Amino acid sequence: MPTLEVQKLHDDACIPSYQSDGAAGLDLHARLDHAITIAPGDIALITIGIAIALPPGHEGQVRPRSGLASRHGITLPNAPGTIDEDYRGEITVPLINLGGEAFTVEPGMRIAQMVVAPVTHCTIVELGALGATKRGDSGFGSTGS
């Protein structure tokens, strides 16, 4: 099992944790000095209060929490966000309020989840033309809905 190394940057920061044995994501908690209210349509950058060292060959995928998204319209404008293996700064999460009412983020609130996933690096080869496929260059919606 890979190891995720975590450094608390503030004494009151929460260490990410899985909420069940079968959970794919680690919950990330807001590390705030005071509550922050996000108006409809606004984005707020929320600090988590930790830095991490991901296992070699892995990334951290930061994703919305389904309950906040479905009940309040709180999501990530860049979902999923990527934390690169070599990043050592403080983890922050941009939240956007797509709901119709203001939403308040309280200190310690679970605001996002992070899935640690393997990354594959490719050898890049430039070609004058690519091999043909049945789909070809048909784009959005070309395979149905």
Image: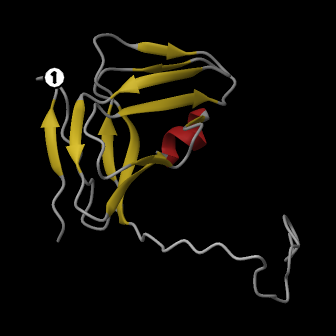
The residue most toward the left is: 11
User: In the rendered image, which quarter is residue 8 located in?
Assistant: top left
Quadrant location, the C terminus? bottom right
Q: Nearer the viewer, residue 76 or 70?
A: 76
Instruction: Return the residue at label 1.
Output: 10
Q: Position of residue 140 (x, y in %)?
A: 84, 64
Amino acid bearing label 1: His
Up-down relation of residue 68 to residue 135 (above or below):
above
Q: Nearer the viewer, residue 45 or 139?
A: 139
User: In the rendered image, which quarter is residue 106 located in?
Assistant: top left
Q: Position of residue 2 (x, y in %)?
A: 18, 66
The residue most toward the top is: 34
Q: Give the residue at x 24% y 28%.
A: 49
Up-down relation of residue 51 to residue 106 (above or below):
below
Specify the color scheme.
Answer: secondary structure
Numbered disc 1: secondary structure? loop
Q: Nearer the viewer, residue 53 or 47?
A: 53
Q: Position of residue 111 (x, y in %)?
A: 40, 35
Up-down relation of residue 63 to residue 134 (above or below):
above
Q: Position of residue 121 (x, y in %)?
A: 43, 69
Q: Give the residue at x 33% y 10%.
A: 34
